Image (cartoon, helix red, strand yellow):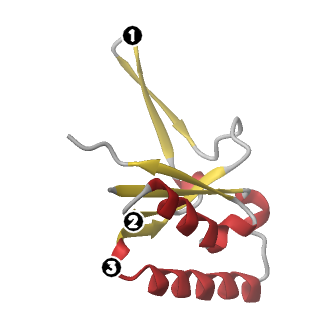
Amino acid sequence: MKYMLLITWDELSGLKRPPAEEQAELAEHGAFVEALGARLTEGARLLPSSEGTRVRMRGGKRQLTDGPFAETKEALGGYYVIECASRAEALDWAARCPSAKHGTVEVRALWTT
């Protein structure tokens, strides 16, 4: 079954980290990706929420809200889609994700038909 690991973090403080700290975490993510091996089917880091736009349809009209989104404390920073034999295995991988140390990694199974 495929699971999505949704990474959320405190974007405001995270984007202010020193470059060396940023590079160290990127290296940890590289090692995480290597460890996942063939389990990894997709993944990406997202641009900051200030680059995003939320779309809502209300009364047949489109409403756009440009980021950053003040009502959220944590922002979606990236994701991995992994193939695992069980939910327990997906949770184990989420715990190994470097972003779990300072943010949150939400595990969601992908809908299958």
Question: In terms of secondary structure, where does tag 1 sit?
Answer: loop
Q: Residues within 10 Å of mark 2 (few under 14, many from 20)?
A: many
43 w.r.t. 109: above or below: below
* Residue at left offset 56%, top offset 80%: 29
* Residue at left offset 53%, top offset 63%: 47
Q: Closest to the observer: 27 or 91?
A: 91
* Chain-order first, disc 1 or disc 2: 1
Q: Position of residue 72 (x, y in %)?
A: 69, 40
Does residue 79 appear in this view? no
Three-letter amino acid code of the residue under disc 3: Ala
* Residue at left offset 55%, top offset 59%: 91
Question: In terms of secondary structure, where does tag 3 sit?
Answer: helix
What separation in Å lies between label 1 and label 2 (alpha carbons)? 38 Å
Residue under label 2: 82
Residue under label 3: 38
Does residue 41 appear in this view? yes
Q: Is residue 82 left or right of residue 11?
A: left
Three-letter amino acid code of the residue under disc 1: Gly
Of the two numbered discs 1 and 2 in the rendering, the one whose residue sits closer to the viewer: 2
Q: Residue furthest top?
A: 59
What separation in Å lies between label 3 and label 2 (alpha carbons)? 8 Å
